[in-house]
Image (cartoon, rainbow, N blue to C red):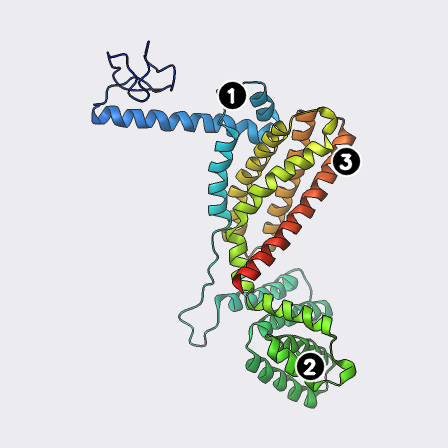
Amino acid sequence: MSAGKYRKEHNCLNCGAHVEKHYCSDCGQPNLELKESFWAFISHSIAHYFHFDNKFFQTLSPLLTKPGKVTLDYLAGKRARYINPVSMYIFVSIVYFLVVYSPKHVTKDKHNDDGITVEKKKNQNVTDSVSKALKLAGMPENNAIIKKTVKSLDNAIKTKEFKKLGFKDQEIELNRIKAENLTLKSDSLEDIIDNYSDIHIERNDSTYASYLARQQKLPSAEQDSWYEKLLKKRAISLGEKSEVIHETLEHNRPKQYFLLMPLLALFIMWNFRKNHIYYLNHLIFTIHGMTAYFIVQIFTAPLIKHVFQNTYVITKTIELAVLVWICWYMFSALKVFYQRKTGSIIFKMFWIFVLFWIAFNVSEFIMVNLIYYVAT
């Protein structure tokens, strides 16, 4: 892989050891001349790059298509063709978290004087599209199914928009609907009023002080207990800092996955303890599996997030495909690496999923609380 002119001297410039041929037997540095031409420098750099590139793709192909093979080869000593598992994981995970956990930006229509967001327009387009699709399916315009479907969808969208309003704006909208209901006496409006009232109360309790003020106005029998008040205080505090907590949580995802990986290896070792394999081997197996998952997510997550974000069917299809791939990959990798029967693999895989799910949620809970206490 080295490109350049070798030195005539036999002393290593890096460690000072005696060099018999072209490479130092102590540190491995090539015994090259210090001065090199521009093209020699470029060719040397390209050689290093394509050496990594070649090993990367030699590792990538079997890692994704032949679950468990890379780990078996690596542990069997066939390592020259593959990138080191940790190096591969670090490289892929950096790309993964840059791609998958990039911040989302809310876009607004700058040309709209009313300040209506693009999201609101899309919601209206969804309602119109559903209505048109049902009509194209051959249903008449006055069909009860069409009316009910469009009305339900419209109510859901309006409820979503109502939640985004400020407290005073919610109160104005609620009073408007109540006034309208006094005239029309509609059951559907009654349902909307009940729904909006609950949302409005939640918004009213957006601060602990406002919650206590509302509690004092209630009869003693209807007031919350001290424990319920304590829980409410915590919930309100979390809600007030939800944006900060969410951003900090996403920012710390790499640490969470990195810390959970040894735990996942421990779960796998516990389930396959009769194989009598060292923990490090389980860990290498886990690193390869996590790396493969990251690679798949690097390609699928941007499609869901940026390309098909408004196409429910396609996004769910992609998510389902990824889930199926995870199950297939894990089953195949466990079967190849641990050499167990199909039924045993499925049973143990189920428990590995359960244990990891519990560990993930516990770590999530701990992280949220740590972020909350730091933020407060």
* Residue 328 seen anywhere in this rendered image of the structure: no
Who comes first in sequence, dot 2 or dot 1?
1
Which quarter of the figure has residue 152?
A: bottom right
Check residue 24 in the rendering and tell me which mark sits there, or answer none.
none
Residue ID at (64%, 78%) = 211
Q: Quadrant of the N terminus?
A: top left
User: Could you tell me which secondary element the residue under label 2 belongs to?
Assistant: helix
User: Could you tell me which secondary element the residue under label 1 belongs to?
Assistant: loop
Residue ID at (48%, 57%) = 104
Find disc 1 in the rendering and name its residue: 79
Give the residue type at disc 3: Phe
Find disc 3 in the rendering and name its residue: 347
Q: CA distance from mark 1 to mark 3?
A: 32 Å
Residue farthest to the top? 20
Q: In the picture provided, is 28 more to the left or to the right than 352?
A: left
Which quarter of the figure has residue 222?
A: bottom right
Tell which tag, 2 or 3, sits nearer the viewer.
2
Asked whether 230 or 353 is in front, the reply is: 230
Q: Please say if 295 is above or below 164.
A: above
Residue ID at (76%, 84%) = 220
| Residue 23 location (% of width, % of height) | 34, 15
Give the residue type at disc 2: Gln
| Label pair 2/3, CB-CB below 8 angstroms | no
Q: Please say if 201 is above or below 326.
A: below
Asked whether 18 or 73 is in front, the reply is: 18
Who comes first in sequence, dot 2 or dot 3?
2
* Residue 136 seen anywhere in this rendered image of the structure: yes
Give the residue type at disc 1: Arg
Q: Please say if 302 is above or below 340.
A: below
Who comes first in sequence, dot 1 or dot 3?
1
Find disc 2 in the rendering and name its residue: 215
